[in-house]
Amino acid sequence: MSMTQPNSSTAKTPDPPDSSVFDLAALAAKFPPTADTMLLDMRLTDESAASSRLFRIYRPVPAHFHKTCDEYLHVILGRGRFVVDGQEPVELGPGQLLFFRRNKVHAIPEVIESPLVVFSVDTPRRDPADVTFVDPSDGTAKDFIRTIPAY
């Protein structure tokens, strides 16, 4: 089995490798200090069964949900307060994992320690447009997240 880094220099998108190694700390260091959206993400894998992403949270994220996927959120750097399904807020930091099913309302009302960087696995794949804010005046998918290249 060969371990490969994704290659973005080819003109034709290659078939996804059977395996890959991702240096999450090195990738997290690539996020810029500010963003015009609430989050910036890097898609590490993007297949119909699941997508994996690394994202940085730049400011509080209002209550929202995703219609098409369950989410696993693993904090890599920083600390934040997370709320799921109206429960009491929970503070999460490096090494902690949060799971919730599709259609569960969730929010990140406070970035306690920045940068707040999270590794996410979405099952099945989450389309970048799949975000519904509980209060529509909080924004749209374009306000929520923008994808930047990982490599």
Image (cartoon, rainbow, N blue to C red):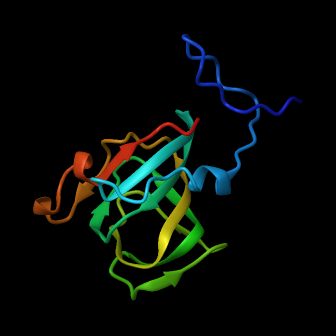
Q: Position of residue 4 (x, y in %)?
A: 77, 31
Of 103 and 135, the residue lying toward us: 135
The percent position of residue 20, horizontal first and vertical second, equals 74, 37
Between 44 and 151, which is closer to the camera in this rendering? 151
Q: Quadrant of residue 25?
A: bottom right
**Residue visible at 35% across and 54% down?**
66
Q: Is residue 11 above or below residue 31?
A: above
Return the residue found at the far bottom: 88
Quarter location, residue 102: bottom left
The N terminus: image quadrant: top right
Number of numbered labels in the structure image: 0
Q: Left of 84 or right of it: where is 8?
A: right
Q: Assign the C terminus to one quadrant of the image.
A: top right
Can you give x and y, in whole percent of width and height, for residue 23 in the image? Answer: 71, 49
Residue at the image position 34 percent from the left and 71 percent from the top: 107
Percent x, y for residue 6? Answer: 66, 30
Task: Tell me: 97 left or right of 64.
Answer: right
Left/right of residue 98 with respect to residue 148 in the rendered view: right
User: Residue drawn 47% across and 85% down?
Assistant: 90
